[in-house]
């Protein structure tokens, strides 16, 4: 199957179990929202998929387009088309946005120690198109990556990165956290503009509000390291109205 398949995934951090059997399939062309309370394992899932060394996979599998991601280092996962947007993007003083984007694109294109750099005219054309699409100002390009950026500017840059890298599977880890309504709309616009038949998107969020601007195909609820409920957009609205406690109550009553 084309897309992301997570099967019976168990993950621990510092010998403490966090994920306790995750089963998830995100097909190409779909947008899935993963919701859950703080500490439920949402960020652990995203960082495990990307290959963060702190997270130990005890059992299970993570497959992208039929290939075992767990057997690959982080850079190879990125070259296979995987993209991760962080909740708190890091600043890189002294590295301009333009240089960062071009270096990252060329690193993703390299194969077996062989360069396959994107020609400069092609890079400039792609960058211009994506900046216009996302309404990013030209002044961004000369600024250091995230250095002194507002929260909204950081998210706008992440959306630009995502569109420049052209992933086949994007995992967005609470990229809407702490944003005002204008910045939230920037993120939602970037997600909707990426949506297409060759791209899958896993949107991890704590709140329902971004789903007012992004229409997910499926909504999953993660509680205590397990997906305990899956449904449509209406499930997110139910969580907004009732909170997560009602899910926990059903779960521990044996009804979920």
Image (spheres, helix red, strand yellow):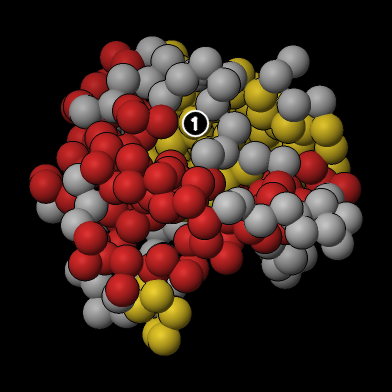
Q: Residue furthest left?
A: 181
* Label 1 crowd (10 A; few <14 / some 14-19 / many >=20): many
Q: Residue 153, relative to residue 11: is it above or below? A: below
Task: Give the number of callouts.
Answer: 1
Q: Quadrant of the N terminus?
A: top right
Q: Is residue 91 above or below residue 6?
A: below
Query: Residue 188: horizontal and vertical position, in percent?
Result: 27, 36
The residue pinned by badge 1 equals 201
Q: Is residue 82 left or right of residue 56?
A: left
Above or below: residue 8 compared with residue 157: above
Q: Is residue 78 visible?
A: yes
Identify the residue at horizontal 20%, vertical 27% (top origin). Answer: 212
Q: Closer to the camera, 198 or 112?
A: 112
Q: Residue at x 32, y 28 (%)?
A: 192
Nearest the eye: 185 or 256:
185
Compared to residue 246, the image places residue 11 above or below, namely below
Q: Is residue 83 left or right of residue 37?
A: right
Q: Residue at x 58, y 52 (%)?
A: 119
Answer with the quarter of the image where residue 26 lies: top right
Which type of secondary structure does the marked residue at label 1 adopt?
strand
Nearer the observer, 70 or 120: 120
- In percent of width and height, residue 19 lies at 66, 45
Residue 249, quarter of the rendered image: top left
At x 60%, y 52%, the residue is 118
Q: Quadrant of residue 234?
A: top left
| Coordinates of residue 125 in the picture (x, y in percent) | 40, 45
């Amino acid at each position: 199957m084309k897309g992301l398949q997570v099967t019976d995934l168990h993950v621990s951090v510092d010998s403490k179990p966090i994920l306790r059997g995750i089963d998830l399939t995100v097909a190409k062309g779909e947008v899935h929202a993963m919701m859950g309370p703080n500490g439920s394992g949402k960020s652990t899932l995203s960082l495990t998929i990307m290959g963060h060394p702190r997270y130990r996979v005890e059992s299970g599998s993570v497959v992208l387009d039929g290939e075992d991601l767990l057997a690959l280092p982080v850079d190879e996962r990125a070259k296979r088309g995987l993209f991760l947007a962080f909740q708190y993007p890091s600043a890189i003083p002294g590295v301009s946005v333009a240089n960062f984007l071009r270096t990252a694109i060329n690193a993703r294109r390299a194969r077996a120690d062989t360069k396959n750099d994107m020609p400069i005219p092609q890079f400039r054309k792609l960058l211009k198109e994506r900046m216009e699409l996302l309404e990013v100002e030209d002044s961004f390009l000369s600024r250091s990556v995230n250095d002194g950026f507002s929260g909204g500017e950081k998210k706008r840059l992440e959306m630009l990165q995502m569109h420049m890298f052209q992933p086949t599977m994007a995992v967005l880890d609470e990229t809407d956290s702490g944003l005002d309504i204008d910045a939230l709309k920037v993120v939602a616009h970037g997600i909707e503009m990426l949506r297409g038949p060759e791209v899958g998107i896993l949107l991890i969020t704590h709140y329902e509000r971004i789903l007012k601007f992004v229409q997910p195909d499926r909504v999953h609820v993660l509680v205590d390291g397990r997906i305990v409920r899956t449904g449509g957009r209406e499930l997110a609205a139910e969580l907004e109205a009732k909170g997560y406690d009602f899910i926990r109550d059903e779960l521990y009553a044996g009804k979920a």
